[in-house]
């Protein structure tokens, strides 16, 4: 995977807000709170109505991509399992309240899609305190939009900036499986109670391993890849996220591999954080957690972790 310039330089706004940190002391922004995220989502929903509605027709976003710095995201979700689902519930309730007001005023409120979609994402070029938003009219559609409306709030100013950027920019974002929610659109504009569950996802590929430990002797262990990002880790990893393949052995580092599926070209890529990893008998360079070095990962590949654990990637 080729190395690219940073996100802000690629969209042409590098010099607008990225100031010299050595010349200016930036006040530490408060940590993200559920109310901060809730208000941000509702504000963007209202802005979409203001920007896209015409005549007596109310038009609004159905997909909401909320973007953070990776460390901010981790700090927010620590000890708050399920909090994003609750924020989504309350956001959709507020959406319906706003839409009912427009309907009662005699305006036409008809959806452009059959569901609401929420994605919590991060980007490596977002600094601590940065926050962004991308809205889509049709969620999950296959039609490639030429441009997207991106709202970004830099930590230096706290002032929102909105830009039109190419759809390919989305390739740089990291999507979290536990931060992806779908909720059916209710024509009566009433939220149906119940926690929104992550959408059922199709299997992209599968990983297969044989662990040398005695209790697993002769047994193959399989992991189904359903998301764009998969982490392969060892038994010291305390996380239980659905995109983490935790191999029950001390021979794998925690984490050991990051496997990424690039939907644009249909290929897999690999970054290794473990002590030693070989891919089809070729040594994979060791990466830092925050600076992965990506190498192509063909299907039917054989990986070897620390010279002990064999791991194969197969088509689903």
Image (tube, rainbow, N blue to C red):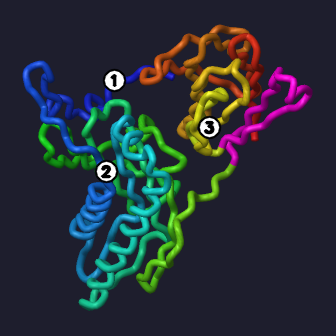
Going from N to C along the chain, the mark reached first, 3 or 1, is 1
Quarter of the image for residue 124 reads top left
The residue beneath circle 2 is 133
Quadrant placement of the C terminus:
top right
Q: Compared to 300, does 95 lie above or below?
A: below
Residue 220 part of the magenta-drawn span: yes
Q: Report the Cα–Cα distance between label 3 and label 1.
A: 29 Å
Cα distance between the residues tagged 2 and 3 = 26 Å
Q: In this rendering, is residue 286 above or below 296?
A: above
Q: Secondary structure at mark 1?
A: loop
Image marks 1 and 2: residues in contact by CB distance under 8 Å: no
Q: Nearer the viewer, residue 79 or 60?
A: 79
In the image, residue 311 lies at what x, y percent?
Answer: 75, 24
Q: Which residue is mark 1?
A: 5
The answer to whether the residues at label 3 and label 1 have Cβ atoms under 8 Å apart is no
Label disc, if present, on residue 306 of the rendered structure: none
117 on left or right of 284: left
Q: Residue at x 57, y 40 (%)?
A: 228
On the image, numbered disc 3 is attached to which residue? 244
Residue depth check, mark 3 versus mark 1: number of the one nearer the observer: 3
Q: Position of residue 248 (x, y in %)?
A: 73, 30
| 87, above or below 194, in the image | above
Chain part drawn in magenta: 203-225
């Amino acid at each position: 995977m080729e190395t690219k310039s940073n996100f802000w330089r690629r969209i042409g706004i590098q010099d607008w807000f990225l100031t010299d940190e050595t010349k200016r002391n930036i006040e530490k922004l408060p940590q993200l709170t559920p109310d901060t995220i809730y208000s941000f989502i509702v504000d963007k929903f209202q802005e979409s109505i203001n920007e896209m509605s015409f005549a007596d027709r109310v038009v609004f976003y159905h997909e909401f991509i909320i973007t953070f710095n990776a460390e901010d995201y981790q700090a927010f979700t620590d000890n708050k399992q399920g909090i994003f689902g609750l924020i989504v519930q309350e956001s959709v309730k507020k959406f319906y309240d706003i839409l009912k007001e427009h309907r009662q005023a005699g305006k036409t409120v008809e959806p452009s899609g059959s569901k609401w979609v929420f994605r919590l994402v991060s980007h490596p070029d977002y600094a601590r305190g940065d926050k962004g938003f991308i809205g889509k009219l049709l969620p999950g559609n296959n039609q490639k939009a030429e441009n997207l409306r991106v709202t970004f709030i830099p930590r230096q100013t706290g002032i929102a900036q909105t830009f039109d950027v190419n759809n390919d920019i989305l390739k740089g974002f990291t999507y979290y499986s536990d931060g992806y929610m779908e909720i059916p659109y209710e024509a009566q504009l009433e939220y149906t109670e119940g926690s929104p569950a992550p959408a059922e996802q199709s299997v992209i590929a599968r990983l297969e391993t044989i662990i040398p430990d005695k209790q697993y002797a002769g047994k193959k262990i399989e992991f189904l890849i359903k998301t764009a990002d998969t982490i392969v880790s060892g038994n010291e990893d305390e996380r239980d996220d659905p995109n983490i393949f935790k191999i029950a052995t001390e021979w794998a580092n925690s984490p050991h591999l990051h496997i990424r599926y690039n939907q644009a070209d249909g290929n897999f890529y690999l970054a290794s954080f473990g002590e030693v990893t070989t891919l089809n008998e070729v040594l994979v360079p060791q990466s830092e957690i925050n600076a992965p070095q990506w190498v192509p990962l063909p299907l039917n590949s054989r990986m070897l972790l620390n010279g002990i654990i064999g791991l194969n990637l197969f088509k689903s």
